[in-house]
Amino acid sequence: MPKLMIDDRKIEVAPGVKVIAAAEQAGIVIPRFCYHPALGSVGACRLCAVKFLDGPVRGLQMSCMVEARDGMVISSTDDEAVDFRRFVIELLMRNHPHDCPVCDEGGYCLLQDETIAGGHAMRRSMGKKRTHRDQYIGELVQHEMNRCIQCYRCQRFYQDYCGYRDFGVMGSASRVYFGRYADGALENPFSGNLIDICPTGVLTDKPARFKGRRWDFQRAPSICIHCSLGCSITVNARYRELVRVEARRNDDINGHFICDRGRYGFAFANHPDRPRQARINGRDTSYEEAIQTTTQRLSEIARTLGPDSIACLSSSRAGVETQMSLKFLTRSQGWRQPGCFVDRSEQNSVTAAVGRLTPERVVSLGEIEKADLILVIGVDPILEAPMLALAMRQAQRAGAGIIILNPQPVSVPFAYDHRPISPDDLCSTLQKWTRSISSQTRTESHFVEKHEEYRGPETPSVPCPLPPVDSLLQNSRRPMIVCGTNIVGTAIIHAAADLARDIHSDCRFPGLFYVLPGPNAFGAAFASAGGKSFSDILPDIETGNIKALILVEADPIFQFPDQERVKNAVKQLDLLVVLDYVPSRSVGFAGQSLAEMVSPAPLHVVIPTLTHFETQASFINQEGRLQQTTPVHVNGLPMSQLTGGKHPPRKFRSDVPGAGARAAWQVLSELEAVLSSTPADSITFADIWYRIGLAWNISVENRTEIPGNLRILSTTVESEPMTEHYRDD
Amino acid sequence: MQILFQNRQPDRIASLEEYRNSGGYEALTLALKKYTRAEVQQLALDAVLLGRGGAGFPAGRKWMTVAESAPFPRYMVCNADEMEPGTFKDRVLIHTDPHQIIEGMIIVGYSVLAEKGIVFIRTSYENAARIMEQEIVRAKEAGFLGKNILGSGFSMEIAVHRSAGRYICGENTAQMRAIEGKRANPTQPPPYATEKGIWGLPTVTHNVETLACIPHILRHGPEWFKSLAATPTAAGTKLYCVSGRVNRPGCFELPMGTRLSEIIEDHAGGMQEGYQFKACLPGGASTRFLPKSFYDIEMDFDAMKQAGHRLGTGSIIVFDHKTCLVAATLNMIEFFARESCGWCTPCREGLPYIREILSRIESGEGCNDDIPQLRRMCRYLCNTYCALAPGAVSPVESLLTYFEDDVQEHIRQRKCPFK
């Protein structure tokens, strides 16, 4: 462990750490442009110069290029180093346009900061500035090449880190150009990160262009809900409108980056048709009336037809609080247990995956990068969990082998060994490898027998002409099994878990990584334990056994494959309540006027809810990590929609227009309180977490702020037994 | 004493027969049959064969850094990407006696067990590239290349690779990337090229002139090679290229360490009528100006280093008293600013800035602040990623050191005093 001194501070760092990173550990940030922790050091910008006063290296050197070694004495404030850095800034500013007042980066531009910090205020060069032609590189990223300071970060990210080739560096000397060979949209599904890593305004957020300055924005840390990985993001809003999303560093999960779906997929929160007002039978009404009408009808139905005639459905995009509030509501009223899935096989798959994750096997996305062999079963990473593809690419760059078992062709930005095994043979192949490995590593026969019961329906063994994946697995030290839950059934999910369990040995530490079908599918597995999926309760609706249906941020009318069937079934209900924040099909169905409805006196209620940008919400990602969002702004009609994109209104008003929505868990808690005749105004976020803590038997000390490293696994929390429905699966 | 130029003809290249008649490919037979690989390396080390490309690194030591256990295939690169302004010795050598270069490559290849040879040649040297291609075929036909050379079990193939045409491709690490088909940006060791070079495999690169020396060392021994030099610490002969206003410009093979005055007066025929020696660049455009006070300096690596200069490629560009050195320096900076690879800031942005200031001074628009600003840039341009910028500012820095009065005169008169 090298011990060195930087700016009179003694520090000890791990071997192989560069001086610039060592200084950062001591709290000293050495200026830089080209250095980026995720992209490594290349010594191009020459801004991180420091003076080595004593030790094995002497003189002015780039701190990103020198490894920290014992006995080094380094000064980052030495006159020569400071003057050299000022010189580098002066050189870069020779060609940089002075367009900061109209540049979107202005205000949080690294070049701007360093220029001011370095004290460069006067341009001594009298020559003309270099100019370039900008390119059209798609609707997501704006290109403004004149501002470029040639740090090569974009090219290194795009080509080396991500493995896409359509954007890169061209030309030489002072005509170096970063762009595409011709105008056209970027092909990289992670291209938005170019905006975050560009140290100046060459690559900026196009949809957010001219929407405001950094200091105008309301900003809050949040979680991406576009897949089950739960990447960390920072959300920016202005005038009640979400403007842009940035990646937030989280070394456990997404590192420094996020995918484009996560970055640009926030328009639902600004949707002009978003439900903002409670509706009863197609008529706008007050929230209070909606609650009162709903509770009255619910009590009636429960009294006349029994509590079993009321069904509730949530979804894997609803937060933990919402899912669990629904569970508490049904339990207190004795209704049917809530479901969280539209399709039974999806519920089975998720439940199986959640049930098989153990603390020893579960790995985070960040650990995928450290694997030396990755076996991918039935996942298309770019489609189902994009950042997983990027993590696997980093593993491969470090030397890992990647084997993808998938009957379909998959497109990923790295070389891999594709085994197109037919879906029928997949399970038996995995079982064969498991048997082959466990017979070699463990001789106790009872062990194998004991776990034989986990294996799904026995399939006839087929001759498999594949190269020996089992021996590859046995020779790796850190294998990872990545398994999907979308196209594969429960048998394969179990087979993958068995494989991970049985290849474990003293020198092998396998990881198990499931990809789930929603941001909170993990929570949904807990919340729907004992409950049925929509496809299972649909016959009961059709036969009239269920007369009331409460949909909480769920959209079966869109998601169920046979839409006519589900519409006809739902028409027979006495009461349909839809709680949601997006204008979904179900919201549209329940919100329409009932003139043409057939059922006698049906009641359709829509109650608007809040997105996770407007309220605190918790999500459990696919590895069981409980994470929380922070509200970034208050809910309400975006100013641009209020004024039609013109100047903000010049008249003051005391209320926020379109702010009638409440968090779904608040609505549900209020329903529960009214139905149970207890005071409704006392239910807070902390109360909900107190109840969840009791239900799961976990202690969450600060119940309003849950730590991001808390893992909720079926083996560590108490919950109802989660059973799978093996019928026709 | 003509060693490398022993077969030099005024109008054509030496044939394989002529080369063999003068003792050619005997060294290869010796290396393959008589010496072990370690002995070949030791011979080069004992002969103090310093790299002739400009850096002067001992050739034998370079081969010894290729580990016994290093992976295969290993590469032997002949750097014929001669683009240093004023330097043309490699072209002359290829056009004179190409087989001694090929033989040198095979011997180096054998000493490090490199079975793949690459001649990386400047794109404008198309004739030289064709000569090399043709002579490689002849050497192969004669059994000096290909499988199992002279029954030794050692095999080697040589390919000719034409550069895409940038000065930076002559830099060792950038050249390796260029061969890989990547952008020719230099990389910084470690890992060293002899450890992880082309495609991550051990690579030994030598200048054309260095390779041409090797067969002679093997045939005549290190003591003989050292005795060729004019100074006690130097070894061998050197190809000096002389250009400028001298009576007989050209490429001369002379003992290493020959005095500058002797090269110019005796071999290049002295200055032209009516012109006096003012200064010269001793080793291409990326070395410092040598003013008249160094007229008697011994032109070898050590003596030049002690005087605070660099021998470089030994290509002497002579400037007479009627030439404006500011304009000459500006011309060279034009070249370097264009040829920067664009990787690091001081080189990419600094050289055009120097060009801007120098052209202002030359056109009479300079101001007094320009000289300290130029000095500061010369100092800081030495902190770049590779050696291009430190070399590029050498003429500027020495211009300000030895000929500051000329520069001041430009600023005072608001015009170039030489025009």
Image (cartoon, coloured by chain):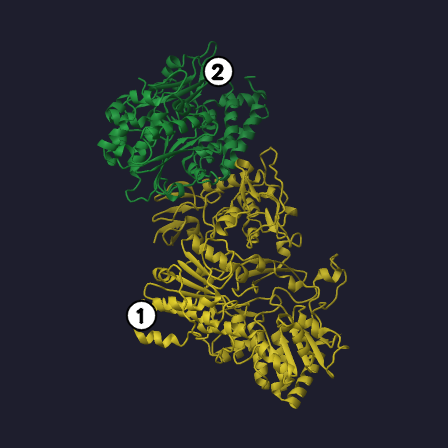
**The label number, if any, that marks residue B215 in the structure image:** none
**The label number, if any, that marks residue B321 in the structure image:** 2
Q: Which chain identifier belongs to the yellow chain?
A: A
Viewer-proximal residue among B317 and A425:
A425
**Most distant residue in the top direction:** B273
Taking B201 as reference, is B19 above or below it? above
- Res. A49 image quadrant: top left
Q: Is residue B328 left or right of residue A448?
A: right
Residue drawn 40% across the image and 53% down it: A399
Viewer-proximal residue among B100 and A143:
B100
| Quadrant holding the C terminus of chain B | top right
Q: Give the residue at mark 1.
A: A442
x, y (%) of residue A79? Answer: 46, 41
Q: Amino acid at mark 1?
A: Arg
Residue drawn 38% across the image and 66% down it: A433
Q: Is residue B22 left or right of residue A522?
A: left
